[in-house]
Amino acid sequence: MSVGTELSAGEAAAMIPHGSTVAFSGFTAAGAAKAVPRALAARAEAEHQAGRPFRLRVLAGASTGASVDETLARANAIAFRAPYQSSKTLRQQINRGEVEFVDMHLSHVAQQLGQGVYGAIDWAVIEATELTHDGKLYPTTSIGLSPTFCDLAARVVVELNQAHHPRLREMADIVTLPPPPHRGVIPIEQPLTKIGRPYIQVDPAKIVGVVRTNEPDEAVDLAPPDEVCRQIARHLVTFLLDQMAQGRLPADLPLQSGVGNVANAVLGELGESPDFPPFLMYTEVYQDALIELMRRGRCLGASASALAVSKAGLRTIYDEIDFFAPRIVLRPQEISNHPAVARQLGVIAMNTALEVDLYGHVNSTHVHGTDLMNGIGGSGDFERNAFLSFFMCPSVAKGGRISAIVPMCSHVDHNEHSVQIVVTEYGLADLRGVAPERRAELLIERCAHPAYRDYLRGYLAGARVGHLRHDLDRAFELHRNLIEHGAMLPGLTLSEAAS
């Protein structure tokens, strides 16, 4: 078949056999393949009804749109998944042990794929705005791992999506790193520096066909930030302004922000502060809050791997493409999340945590140490290598039944040697240069919910003396209570905890 051969989604899905490793474009729902994965799910259901197996090893840049993870998971068509997900059905299957899942730092995935750690990639399904006769593929709203997938896959199917603006290519900056030791320096001197080209070069011989589509990204709208999120944001912005006033923080460092209500609240608070200077972003996802900040001149530009915005937000960008195109750069995730670039630029990193223990270890991924939420994503890429890094979370969850500040994390994604600053709605604990016992005191008095402070103080007072004070008989008492009784402190009234 030639590059121009057109296929239906069903015809493309029929080519992909049971047991294949299939790599899909997408970094969040942005730029994710849509038609072919839905057809694969339908095929899986038909095969299962006929008594035949049909499951795939699935790769993507990060999480994806519903047509990939959620639809395939509901069809019981996923046997293996890496490196990140946010699908409710897939999460449940992973936590029941029905799907193998590898949780990875997103900046590491491309190199490990190139090393063959995950075996051969049989198929890549990549969304594009255009494909030329000589194999130049122009991606849509994300870059993610698509360049790596196109390079390594034995066969490529292209979803040509007419719903996306052809001028997205003006944002794309695609470069693939050679293997070490001859990799060289990544010459990004500021977030909007471009070092690559606007397309992915694909061997035309590998392209088995094109599936035409016309549908927007399957974006999920976030609820507006609540007062807890806004209070976290105020603490963080006040701290940044104080550090600038003391001469400890340069005024023009780029920002990195995770996804979610807290992150949007922080960006909004930064935009509203008359004392915080206009800023650039060097991050992994461009999100809705940045649209208005750019319009107002508060955000001067952003480097990311995806336009992870709502449908309304994407329409705004397309309607005002003359304004936004020169202010946004989209990169492969091994560049957008590269630790060397984050350190070189002096990024200020702001990410969310599930729980933080008394000495500053952070759990970002596993509820009571066992059940996966989404994955570590890019938080570790930025947190350890940032000029300044924050972990943010509400002090309690589930109406007060869960405390975010615990004696010992039930799972550790970010250790005490990397975590710098922790913020909840009650305050901020700067852990830099602080010995362990003082760290514990700061986290209890400034970050823990008042309803949990007496318990945490008592735990610390009764713990065995050491460089890190711990009572191994009680270290996971709160987690055991949560599993056995549905609350970390069963005797605590929810109204008291939520106040």
Image (spheres, rainbow, N blue to C red):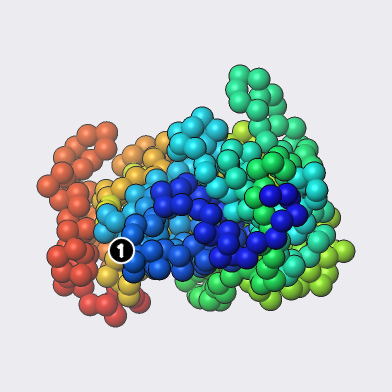
- Rendering coords of residue 167 (x, y %): 82, 60
Left or right for 322, reference 442: right
The residue at the point 62 percent across, 33 percent down is 340
Task: Evaluate whether residue 133 shows in this view.
Answer: yes
Q: How many marks?
A: 1
The residue at the point 53 percent across, 76 percent down is 223
In this picture, is 202 found above or below 324? above
Which image quadrant for residue 32?
Answer: bottom right
Work out which residue is located at the far left of the displayed protein and give it.
Answer: 473
* Element at label 1: loop
- Rendering coords of residue 202 (x, y %): 71, 42
Label 1 neighbourhood size at 10 Å, few (<14), some (14-19), many (20+)? few
> The residue under label 1 is which amino acid type?
Gly
Taking depth in this image into account, of 102 and 241 the one nearest to the observer is 102
Quick one: quadrant of the C terminus? Answer: bottom left
Which image quadrant for residue 295?
Answer: bottom right
Work out which residue is located at the far right of the displayed protein and give it.
Answer: 322
- Label 1 sits on residue: 51
- Rendering coords of residue 382 (x, y %): 55, 43
Taking depth in this image into account, of 38 and 369 the one nearest to the observer is 38
Task: Evaluate whether residue 289 shows in this view.
Answer: no
Left or right for 336, reference 425: right
Work out which residue is located at the far bottom of the displayed protein and give it.
Answer: 495
The residue at the point 37 percent across, 37 percent down is 435
Taking depth in this image into account, of 359 and 156 the one nearest to the observer is 156
- Rendering coords of residue 281 (x, y %): 69, 52
The residue at the point 41 percent across, 49 percent down is 19
Taking depth in this image into account, of 151 and 336 the one nearest to the observer is 151
